[in-house]
Amino acid sequence: MLPETDGEVATRVANEILKRLKRAQLKKYVGAEASRSSNYRDGFTSQNLTASMGIASATKEHNMYDTIRTADAAMYQAKSLGKDRVFSAYQKELLSPIP
């Protein structure tokens, strides 16, 4: 939720979040035994993070429930197009595949 933010700014924010997530690594503990028998370091392995985001704008015609439902539908549309995507509910187009 980004109060007082238009779709263009929301898209820029979403893309920046995706870029930062792409650079982040999630450490997962797999146990000391696994680290002895494979390439795990100190019992941990790293996993990349991905996200799909939907953008919707609140309007006077729609209540907050409708706006959240619209954003949720946009997020599922982004997910259906692949990982690390932003989809606008109103532009009806893919806004970003992050390289």
Image (spheres, rainbow, N blue to C red):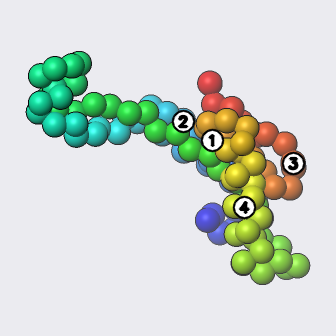
Q: CA distance from mark 4 to mark 2?
A: 20 Å
Q: CA distance from mark 3 to mark 4?
A: 12 Å
Q: CA distance from mark 1 to mark 3?
A: 17 Å
The 10 Å Cα crowd at callout 4, few under 14, some 14 to 19, many 20 or more, is many
Q: Nearer the viewer, mark 1 or mark 3?
A: 3
Name the residue that disc number 1 marks.
15
4 or 2: tag closer to the N-terminus: 2
Q: Amino acid at mark 3?
A: Lys
Q: CA distance from mark 1 to mark 4?
A: 16 Å
Name the residue that disc number 3 marks.
92
Name the residue that disc number 4 marks.
71
Q: Is residue 67 above or below residue 48?
A: below
Q: Amino acid at mark 1?
A: Asn
Is the residue under label 1 in contact with that under label 2 (CB below 8 Å)? yes
Q: CA distance from mark 2 to mark 1?
A: 6 Å
Q: CA distance from mark 3 to mark 2?
A: 22 Å
Q: Nearer the viewer, mark 1 or mark 4?
A: 4
3 or 2: tag closer to the N-terminus: 2
Q: Quadrant of the N terminus?
A: bottom right
Q: Is residue 20 above or below residue 57?
A: above
Name the residue that disc number 2 marks.
19
**Res 83 visible:** yes
In the picture provided, is 3 more to the left or to the right than 21? right
Q: Image quadrant of residue 17?
A: top right
